[in-house]
Image (cartoon, helix red, strand yellow):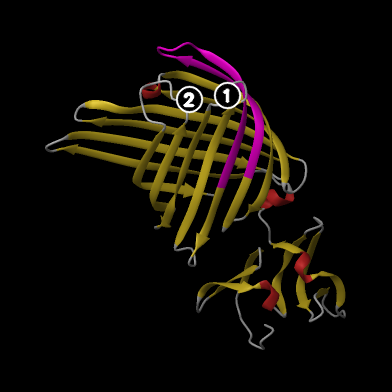
């Protein structure tokens, strides 16, 4: 280390500005990469630079001038790259264009009360994602079915399939197909199909952020009012980040839809909350759902706010 200390352990990987080191005396340590003076590994590590150049070596020395040197046994140090140009050490295989990373989650909020009032709430949402270096497939779904005093108060579901094709490390284009039903908003079925462009600002285990905008063709089959079809501008934000040494993960995602043929009409669906990792992939969550429709077809309010406590499972 640059402060003169020496750490012993096995190098796991490097992401962002953190080098992960597994030790027998303190578990897994996260060390600031810019504080690492040098390391020696029993087995070669793979270093992926921002230029996408891949280097394999056992020895690395970071100088005070911001350069990283490597060498082979019996050779002298030679400068190879800037220290801050290291994107990953021991990157996941998909970052080297080897197969797909499969990740996903599913969360439940179930409540049943048969005391003085009869209530039964069911809320399920999940995501399944396949990610390679050049493309990404994402499936998401939401189901809500609630009753209050024996009468149904929520009956809706939402399903989306998306495909993304990356043109650079951070930029991509894609297409979506989604289906939505909301009986209490007079919506029998809303079908959305269209292209979009996006940017992946961050994509790591600790921090993810992406933004998408595009145009979509919307078809609405309604239960009582006239059916409708129109061109829309849509946007999507997906953000999550761990805080307090991974004690909690804050997340926010929302979908926006703006009718370009009737610009007075706009809908917004969002979910914001905190996840608390438990064990073996299980998580507990506290969530706020906020939905907005400035021109609802049924006799309901423009906004709908729901608070939930959920239990779920996620993997990657």
Q: Residue at x 49, y 51 (%)?
A: 251
Label 1, label 2: how far apart the Cα atoms are:
9 Å
Label at residue 192: 1
Where disc 2 sits, the SS reads strand
Residue 46 at x, y percent in the picture: 74, 62
Q: Predominant secondary structure in magenta?
A: strand
Q: Magenta residues?
A: 211-238
Residue 3 at x, y percent in the picture: 66, 87
Label at residue 75: none
| Residue 109 visible in the picture | yes
Q: Are marks 1 and 2 in contact (CB under 8 Å)?
A: yes
Q: Residue furthest left?
A: 116
Task: Tell me which numbered mark, 1 or 2, is placed earlier along the sequence.
Answer: 2
Q: Is residue 110 left or right of residue 256?
A: left
On the image, numbered disc 2 is attached to which residue?
Answer: 180
Residue 131 at x, y percent in the picture: 64, 43
Graded by Cα atoms within 10 Å as few (under 14), some (14 to 19) or many (20 or more), the crowding at tag 1 reads: many
Q: Residue furthest front?
A: 264
Where disc 1 sits, the SS reads strand
Q: Is residue 68 left or right of residue 148?
A: right
**Closer-to-camera residue (282/170):** 170
**Closer-to-camera residue (231/23):** 231
Residue 305 included in the magenta stretch of the image: no
């Amino acid at each position: 280390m640059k402060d003169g200390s020496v750490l012993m352990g096995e190098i796991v990987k490097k992401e962002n500005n953190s080098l992960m080191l597994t030790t027998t005396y303190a578990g897994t340590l996260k060390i600031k990469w810019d504080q690492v003076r040098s390391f020696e590994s029993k087995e070669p590590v793979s270093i992926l630079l921002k230029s996408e150049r891949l280097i394999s070596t056992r020895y690395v020395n970071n100088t005070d001038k911001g350069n990283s040197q490597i060498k082979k046994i019996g050779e002298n140090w030679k400068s190879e790259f800037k220290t801050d140009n290291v994107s990953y050490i021991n990157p996941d295989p998909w970052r080297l264009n080897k197969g797909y990373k499969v990740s996903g989650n599913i969360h439940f909020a179930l409540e049943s009360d048969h005391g003085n009032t009869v209530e039964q709430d069911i809320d399920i949402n999940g995501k399944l994602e396949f990610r390679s270096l050049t493309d990404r497939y994402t499936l998401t779904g939401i189901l809500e079915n609630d009753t209050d005093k024996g009468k149904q108060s929520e009956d809706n579901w939402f399903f989306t399939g998306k495909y993304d094709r990356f043109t650079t490390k951070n930029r991509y284009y894609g297409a979506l197909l989604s289906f939505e039903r909301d009986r209490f908003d007079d919506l029998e079925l809303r079908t959305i199909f269209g292209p979009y462009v996006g940017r992946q600002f961050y994509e790591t285990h600790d921090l993810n952020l992406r933004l998408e905008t595009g145009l979509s063709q919307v078809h609405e089959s309604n239960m009582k009012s006239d059916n409708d079809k129109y061109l829309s501008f849509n946007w999507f934000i997906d953000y999550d980040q761990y805080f307090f040494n991974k004690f909690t993960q804050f997340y926010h995602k929302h979908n926006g839809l703006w009718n370009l043929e009737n610009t007075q009409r706009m809908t917004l669906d969002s979910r914001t909350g905190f996840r608390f990792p438990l064990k073996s992939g299980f998580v507990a969550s506290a969530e706020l759902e906020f939905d907005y429709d400035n021109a609802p077809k049924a006799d309901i309010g423009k906004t709908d706010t729901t608070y939930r406590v959920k239990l779920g499972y996620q993997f990657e």
